[in-house]
Image (cartoon, grey):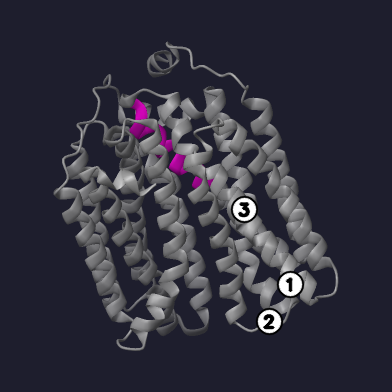
Amino acid sequence: MLSVLRNRTYRRLFTAQVVALTGTGLATVALSLLAYDIAGERASAVLGTALAIKMVAYVGIAPVIGAVADRLPRRALLVSTDLVRAGAALALPFVTEVWQIYALIFLLQAASAAFTPAFQATVPQVLPDERDYTRALSLSRLAYDLESMCSPALTAGLLALVSYGWLFAGTTLGFLASAALVLASALPRPAPVERGGVCARAVFGVRLFWTTPRLRALLALDLAVASAGAIVFVSTVVVVRDHFDRPAGAVSLALAAYGAGSIGAALALPRLLRHVTDRAVMLPAAFALPVALAAVAALTAGAPSTGSWAGVLAAWTAIGAASSAVLTPGGRVVRRSVTDADLPAAFAARFSLSHACWLLTYPLAGLLAAGAGLPVTAAVLGALSLAAATAATAGRPAHDPAPPGRVHALRQG
């Protein structure tokens, strides 16, 4: 897998991604402490609103940026968004009002909504060989998982030495380092594309997903992952602390089990995808998600025990592995479905639509857990995941060559 890092341009881009992710991990904890300092007991409400603002920015901004990304120098776009993120992070320690947090979070996440799809659209052009691109997708998945597992430990170590305000400085340095690495990279120029209005281009990416069977199926798979992932990210603390009455450290253990499953799948995928199709990996993994959620419903419906606790850890590991097996090859599906000129619009649309799935499942998981309990939450989300996986199977034929005129016709329509 690491052989892909021999490509100097990709090596710099991947390093930029890692340092930016590390900075973001530091900011996550620092923002929680800042919210508590400003809002006190209302900190949870502030953080919940900040998360909603993040999702709204992701869903609303990404298609618009994708519409103009093919008209801008790729390096200038990536560097400028990194600088905006660095500026927003640098300003956060100085806020004194809740509304200022909201404004800066929107600015930071809007810049992320511009950076991430443009970055994703650049990688397949830097690595035209499909095997190399597959390795890059697995490395990216690995970077996300390792960040989520290692950032809490790194943050705890730093907080033993400095106040949380300095964590924002670390975030700023991460984004500045990312900008410097991108600036030092020789990036391909965006492929020429027919001109059109910004609104038409923004809608084009979404229409592309809706009218292309394999992309429509990919969106259904994203919903299946969001349905299973929501119970992990929203309800883990409730499962661990309330149902099993385990100490706070067990929350980290459960999340680590999820991360370990995801990492294991990401490491195995490059070799596996040499022998089987994306469809043969993604669809069975999607159907594994409702099975895992059904197990969670059964385990949390009974009395807590050592065996049921081990079962939940196994279910979290299975959800992590299955989610990674669905998400990691997704870039290959997008790449095969559109022309180079339409990669920015397609990746922006996927970024926006996939986060819309999370915007649906996050509050659903929270409301169900609070009002109906964990077994019902797992059962409902499992049913939603099963419906999404079934829709993806029905909507994506085993042989789905994209008609050569489809993209052109969509652009003209």
**Residue 124 drawn above or below residue 88:** above
Instruction: Kindly check if marks 1 and 3 are in contact, taking CB atoms under 8 A apart as contact.
Output: no
Give the Cα distance between marks 2 and 3.
26 Å
Q: Which residue type does callout 2 highlight? A: Arg
Q: Which residue type does callout 3 highlight? A: Thr
Q: Secondary structure at mark 2?
A: loop
The quadrant in which the C terminus is found is top left
The label number, if any, that marks residue 181 in the structure image: none
Task: Provide residue 252's location: percent of width, then percent of height.
Answer: 56, 74
Residue that badge 3 annotates? 361
The region drawn magenta spans 342-356
Mark 3 crowdedness (10 Å alpha carbons): few <14, some 14-19, many ≥20: many
**Residue 392 drawn above or below residue 40:** above
Give the Cα distance between marks 1 and 3.
24 Å
Residue 13 colored magenta? no
Q: Earlier in the sequence, mark 1 or mark 3?
A: 1
Q: Quadrant of residue 167?
A: bottom left
Residue 348 colored magenta? yes
Q: Earlier in the sequence, mark 1 or mark 2?
A: 2
Task: Provide residue 381's location: percent of width, then percent of height.
Answer: 71, 52
The label number, if any, that marks residue 309 in the structure image: 1
- The residue closer to the viewer here, 220 or 148, is 148
Q: Quadrant of residue 298?
A: bottom right
Instruction: Kindly check if marks 1 and 2 are in contact, taking CB atoms under 8 A apart as contact.
Output: yes
The label number, if any, that marks residue 246 in the structure image: 2
Mark 1 crowdedness (10 Å alpha carbons): few <14, some 14-19, many ≥20: some
